[in-house]
């Protein structure tokens, strides 16, 4: 999940001027997580890690 969130962030930051990376936790990953809530929690943690100053 971290790589999936970090990749578009790096691409947006490498773009000249202003760029936006739209991140949405929609993917088929039932074999990677034990519950339906776990992927959302992992996505939120990875997205928050991109901007540590935001709670």
Image (cartoon, rainbow, N blue to C red):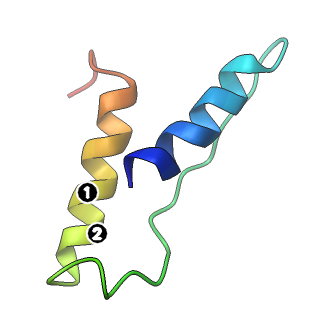
The residue sitting at 70% across, 28% down in the picture is 12
- Image quarter hosting the N terminus: bottom left
Q: Whole-percent x and y of residue 19?
A: 75, 27
Circle number at residue 42: 1
**Mark pair 2, 1: CA separation:** 5 Å
Q: Whole-percent x and y of residue 14?
A: 74, 19
Position of 50 with respect to 36 (left or right) is right
Q: Whole-percent x and y of residue 18?
A: 77, 18
Q: Is residue 50 above or below residue 4?
A: above
Q: Residues within 10 Å of mark 1 (few under 14, many from 20)?
A: some
- Image quarter hosting the C terminus: top left
Q: Quadrant of residue 8?
A: top right
Q: Whole-percent x and y of residue 31?
A: 31, 87
The residue sitting at 28% across, 69% down in the picture is 39
Q: Residue furthest right?
A: 16
The kind of secondary structure element at disc 2 is helix
Q: Is residue 28 above or below residue 12?
A: below
The kind of secondary structure element at disc 1 is helix
Q: Residues within 10 Å of mark 2 (few under 14, many from 20)?
A: many
Position of 42 with respect to 12 (left or right) is left
The residue sitting at 23% across, 83% down in the picture is 36
Q: Which residue is mark 2?
A: 39
Tag 2–tag 1 contact (CB < 8 Å) = yes
């Amino acid at each position: 999940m971290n790589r999936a969130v970090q990749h578009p962030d790096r691409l947006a930051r490498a773009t000249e001027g202003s760029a936006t990376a739209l991140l949405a936790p929609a993917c088929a990953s039932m074999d990677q997580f034990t519950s339906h809530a776990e992927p959302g929690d992992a996505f939120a943690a990875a997205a928050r890690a991109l901007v540590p100053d935001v709670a």
